[in-house]
């Protein structure tokens, strides 16, 4: 491979922050140019760029995926390097390590959020939290996974997968030093999967089937998922899938029994989905903060149903009140300017999601709209103030003026687009942007008048990201994210976040 040597000495003397920054950027630019020159000379180098081992896989690979490894090429010492994955095989068993190191720097215009914004509440202005900024640096989104595949037996392929990150619950009272410098590991995925020629069975914790989590539909964004109004959830489950794969199209249907949204409901959540991929219509796919690959156009529909048993709104509850919740979702990945194989230059793709449901706010992750359970009446002014003991998470159910429970309604959509610049095979620099809307038709109606100023029932979201892969394994990104929320008749609250991130994939 042809190599270029640059004389960096003139760039190095320190002449103040601005010139030092320009010098650093110049070094990175020349390094990237040298790598791109080598990659354009040897197209086979680009073939090693794989999808990042994050939450997502590309559409059309079959779902639920086993976070599948690409084809493996053995080396003399028995180790293999499939893309960014490292595998070792012995006696038919294969163990594969994968993951990424990530550093995120975030500055918010308010003090409303920790690392992730998700669907949390923005504190309104004219308050200490709502009028002052916050700066954070975090490595919590770094990830490590291990996949172990057993020898095939009787036509069945069996594997297990474990994946962890550092977003574990550290509890109240944790110091800021420990919160960011000594985070707690969190279990993301832990499942076994058995695949035969016609069926696949998954048992363990994985993305929900509702909204086809992990199937390649996620927005390409630097923001921690989910963005506002996006279904994003992992749950223990048992899941059965049937796949029909052909040269022109892939079709699959899946059924899942999932951990219930409320344990006292007595039944698991039921989820069902169908997905179609058109294998000859391909474009650039980069779900989440992953590296881009070519993937087929895909569309997915799904539904969820759940049964709730809510404690009567009384100091001494009687028989629980029975309610049903559920929702529907439509997901799409659409190549506008197609691309195929290793060449993603000038590619433009759009993905999106439309959802509507009731009693399923937990599947949007951290969505309550600021709703809390009202206080019990105390007409006799008892010193021991009566309290209500809820047996369901806040935001899933609310009570009307007569203290009858109702599930909370939410509808949402988001759309994301990303364009890949016409050099470096389209994998070196690209741009992405998202917008989203989220609305509830009854969140305010299920809140007592004195508490409505703390409840928002509409939200808007916008983001834009510039991505730069300076090597096949090293990626930089810079983004801006704006969240706007509307508090009933009160003020609009908004948070503007600027974020910069560094990634190393392995």
Image (spheres, rainbow, N blue to C red):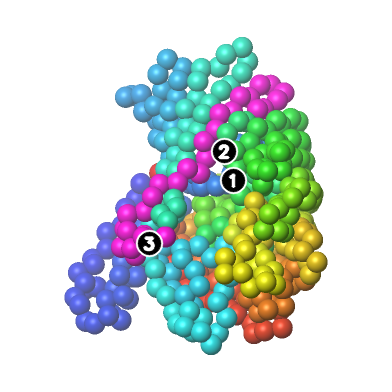
Name the residue tied to disc 1.
234
Q: Is residue 85 left or right of residue 413?
A: left
Q: CA distance from mark 2 to mark 3?
A: 29 Å
Name the residue tied to disc 3.
173
For this rendering, which residue is in front, 448 or 457?
A: 448
- Residue 295 visible to the viewer: no
Mark 2: secondary structure: strand
Residue occupying image coordinates x 24% and y 73% = 11
- Residue 203 visible to the viewer: yes
Q: Position of residue 6 (x, y in %)?
A: 27, 63
Q: Position of residue 136 (x, y in %)?
A: 39, 68
For this rendering, which residue is in front, 88 or 342?
A: 88
Closer to the chain start, of discs 1 and 2, is 2
For this rendering, which residue is in front, 29 or 449?
A: 449
Q: Which mark is residue 205?
A: 2
Q: Is residue 323 left or right of residue 109?
A: right
Residue occupying image coordinates x 65% and y 68% = 375
Mark 1 Cα-neighbour bin, 10 Å: few <14, some 14–19, many ≥20:
some
Residue occupying image coordinates x 41% and y 23% = 89
| Range drawn in magenta | 172-201
Q: Are marks 1 and 2 in contact (CB under 8 Å)?
A: yes
Task: Please name which of the two marks, 2 or 3, marks the residue nearer to the observer.
Answer: 3
Q: Which mark is residue 65?
A: none
Q: CA distance from mark 1 to mark 3?
A: 27 Å
For this rendering, which residue is in front, 301 or 306?
A: 306
Q: Position of residue 235 (x, y in %)?
A: 60, 42
Which quadrant of the view contains residue 234? top right
Mark 1: secondary structure: strand
Q: Position of residue 164 (x, y in %)?
A: 45, 43
Name the quadrant of the C terminus. top left
């Amino acid at each position: 491979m042809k190599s270029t040597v640059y004389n960096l000495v003139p760039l190095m003397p320190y002449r103040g922050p601005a010139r030092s920054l320009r010098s650093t950027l110049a070094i990175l630019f020349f390094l990237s140019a040298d790598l791109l020159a080598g990659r354009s000379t040897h197209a086979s180098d680009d073939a090693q760029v794989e999808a990042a081992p994050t939450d997502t896989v590309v559409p059309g690979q079959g779902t639920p995926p086993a976070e599948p490894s690409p084809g493996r090429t053995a080396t003399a010492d028995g180790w293999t390097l499939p893309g960014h994955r490292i595998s070792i095989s012995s006696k038919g068993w294969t163990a594969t390590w994968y993951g990424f190191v990530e550093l995120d720097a975030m500055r918010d215009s308010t003090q409303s959020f920790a690392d992730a914004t998700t669907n949390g509440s923005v504190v309104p202005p004219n308050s200490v939290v709502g009028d002052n900024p916050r700066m954070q640096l975090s490595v919590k989104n770094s990830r490590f996974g291990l996949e172990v595949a057993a020898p095939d037996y009787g036509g069945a392929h069996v594997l297990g997968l474990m994946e962890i990150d550092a977003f574990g619950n550290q509890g109240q009272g944790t110091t800021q030093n420990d919160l960011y410098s000594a985070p707690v590991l969190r279990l993301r995925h832990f499942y076994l999967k058995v695949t035969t020629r016609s069926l696949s069975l998954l048992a363990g914790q994985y993305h929900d089937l509702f909204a086809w989590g992990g199937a390649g539909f996620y927005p390409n964004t630097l923001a921690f998922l989910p963005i506002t109004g996006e279904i994003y959830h992992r749950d223990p489950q048992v899941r059965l899938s049937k796949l029909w794969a052909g040269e022109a199209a892939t079709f699959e249907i899946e059924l899942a029994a999932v951990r219930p949204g409320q344990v006292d409901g007595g039944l698991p959540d039921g989820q069902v989905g169908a997905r179609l991929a058109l294998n000859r219509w391909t474009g650039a796919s980069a779900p989440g903060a992953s590296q881009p690959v070519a993937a087929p156009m895909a569309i997915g529909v799904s539904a969820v149903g759940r049964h709730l048993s809510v404690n009567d709104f009384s100091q001494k509850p009687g028989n629980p009140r029975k309610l049903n919740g559920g929702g529907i979702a439509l997901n799409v990945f659409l190549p506008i300017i197609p691309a195929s194989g290793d060449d993603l230059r000038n590619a433009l793709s759009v993905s999106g999601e439309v959802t509507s449901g009731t009693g399923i706010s937990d599947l949007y992750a951290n969505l309550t709209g600021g709703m809390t359970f009202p206080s019990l009446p105390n007409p006799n002014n008892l010193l021991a103030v009566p309290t209500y003991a809820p047996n369901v998470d806040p935001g899933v159910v609310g009570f009307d003026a007569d203290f009858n429970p109702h599930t909370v309604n939410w509808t949402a959509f988001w759309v994301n687009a990303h364009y890949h610049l016409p050099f470096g095979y389209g994998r070196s620099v690209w741009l992405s942007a998202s917008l989203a809307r989220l609305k509830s038709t009854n969140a305010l109606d299920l809140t007592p008048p004195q508490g409505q100023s703390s409840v928002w029932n509409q939200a808007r979201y916008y983001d834009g990201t510039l991505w730069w892969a300076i090597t096949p394994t090293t990626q930089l990104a810079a983004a801006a994210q704006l969240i706007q929320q509307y508090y009933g008749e009160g003020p609009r609250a908004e948070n503007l976040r600027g974020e910069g991130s560094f990634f190393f994939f392995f």
